[in-house]
Image (cartoon, grey):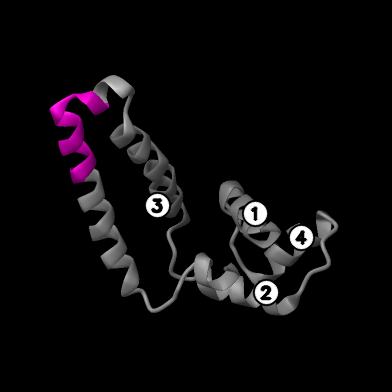
């Protein structure tokens, strides 16, 4: 995870995400840097819009909480409709993710 955190730090500070900068951040944090992991991370992030990925990740838990609702909402008939709509939206997102050819941080770091 420290490799991903290094990339996030660089993104937040407006620095370029490249091998040299990631290595520098990791070394400053006292991490024994594996060059192959740095190269893999840089390659995986090459076409990724990190800000968009963060927004998407932050929206997923919020959508789940809204679909779950309270006990009162579950008793209401429209609560079931909302849950079904959220499940359908998640299934559509899952279908889109399957065609990405294994790219991304999840595939890289498990």
Quick one: label 3 or label 4, which is nearer the N terminus?
4
Q: CA distance from mark 4 to mark 1?
A: 9 Å
Q: Residue at x 25, y 28 (%)?
A: 74
Q: Residue at x 25, y 49 (%)?
A: 87
Give the image quarter of residue 3: bottom right
Q: Nearer the viewer, residue 66 or 23?
A: 66
How packed is label 1: few (under 14 Cα within 10 Å), some, or many (20 or more)? Answer: few
Report which residue position mark 3 lands on. Answer: 52
Report which residue position mark 1 lands on. Answer: 5
> Which stretch is magenta?
74-85
Q: Using residue 59 as the reference point, say whether residue 89 is left or right of it.
A: left
Q: CA distance from mark 2 to mark 3?
A: 23 Å
Q: Using residue 25 as the reference point, say whether residue 99 is left or right of it.
A: left
Residues at marks 3 and 4 touching, judged by CB atoms closer than 8 Å: no
Quick one: label 1 or label 2, which is nearer the N terminus?
1
Q: CA distance from mark 1 to mark 2?
A: 13 Å
Compared with 51, 106 (above or below) is below
Residue 43 in the image, given as x and y percentages of width and height? 54, 75
Residues at marks 4 and 1 touching, judged by CB atoms closer than 8 Å: no
Q: Mark 1: which secondary structure?
A: helix
* Residue 37 marker: 2
């Amino acid at each position: 995870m420290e490799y991903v955190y290094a990339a996030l730090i660089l993104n937040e500070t407006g620095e370029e995400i490249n091998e040299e900068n990631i290595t520098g951040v990791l070394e400053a944090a006292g991490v024994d840097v594996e060059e192959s992991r740095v190269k893999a991370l840089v390659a995986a992030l090459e076409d990724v819009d990190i800000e968009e990925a963060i927004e998407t990740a932050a929206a997923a838990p919020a959508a789940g909480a809204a679909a779950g609702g309270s006990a009162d909402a579950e008793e209401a008939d429209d609560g079931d409709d909302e849950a079904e709509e959220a499940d359908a939206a998640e299934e559509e997102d899952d279908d889109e993710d399957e065609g990405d050819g294994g790219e991304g941080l999840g595939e890289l770091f498990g």
